[in-house]
Amino acid sequence: MTDSGLEHGLGEILIAEEDLRARVAELGREISSDYEGRDLLLIGVLKGAVFFMADLMRELPLPCEVDFMAISSYGSASDSSGVVRILKDLDINIEERHVLIVEDIIDSGLTLSYLIRNLRSRAPASLEVCALFVKESARQVRKHVRYVGFELPDRFVVGYGLDFAERYRNLPYLAVLDESLFPEGT
Ligand code: IMP
Ligand code: MG
């Protein structure tokens, strides 16, 4: 690890850039074959999923559209009563559409559970989930995630869209955040 400003605070690299690229391409092939003949609407959750979604979409030789939602959740992973609120809703009406939720990482699953409930009530033709990273702690929602990129241990990671205090999203690989920088209990 160098001493540059960008890499300061990072621990080990969990997933290298070329492994991310290869797995995203595989997911693209799987999704393309599953959705052949159907128009797909990808719904990304801001901000972290934007990076993954942009790469995934370019691996899909299908007619597809994108839309975004921004969500804020109060409460930590250990607080299952946490409230989830929509900060930015979809622009598109998803009724009768084949919808694929694209998430960067699933931790407690609180955000995803809320999103599934919310989007299901809008009567899409189908609703599936693709998450690049799923942590061990997400066991309860794992069954709702049709496409999983990588299973991760319960550690705080950054890069490839994932941030710590809005930083590190631009790293092309996934790294563990240096534990000494990470506040207790979050
Ligand atoms: P959940 O509702 O607990 O599943 O949390 C999902 C959201 O928390 C993700 O979309 C991320 O924004 C954030 N998050 C969870 N774990 C991490 C992590 O290890 N690094 C960065 N962000 C994370
Ligand atoms: Mg986030």
Image (cartoon, rainbow, N blue to C red):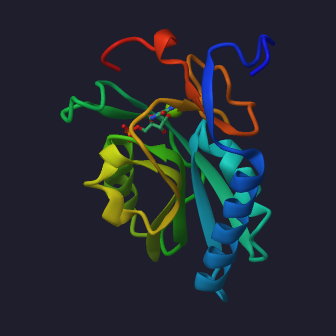
In the rendered image, residue 28, in percent from the top left (x then y), is placed at 68, 70
| Numbered circles on residues, count | 0
Q: Is residue 144 above or below residue 85?
A: below
In the rendered image, residue 81, in percent from the top left (x then y), is placed at 18, 33
In the picture, the quarter occupied by the C terminus is: top left
Q: Is residue 114 visible?
A: no
Q: Residue at x 67, y 57 (%)?
A: 66
Q: Quadrant of ligand 1?
A: top left
Q: Residue at x 45, y 69 (%)?
A: 146
Q: Residue furthest bottom?
A: 37
The quadrant holding residue 85 is top left
Q: Is residue 160 left or right of residue 90?
A: right
In the rendered image, residue 140, in percent from the top left (x then y), is placed at 25, 54
In the picture, the quarter occupied by the N terminus is: top right
In the rendered image, residue 124, in percent from the top left (x then y), is placed at 45, 70
Q: Nearer the viewer, residue 72 or 110?
A: 110
Q: Residue at x 60, y 33 (%)?
A: 162
Q: Is residue 82 above or below residue 59?
A: above
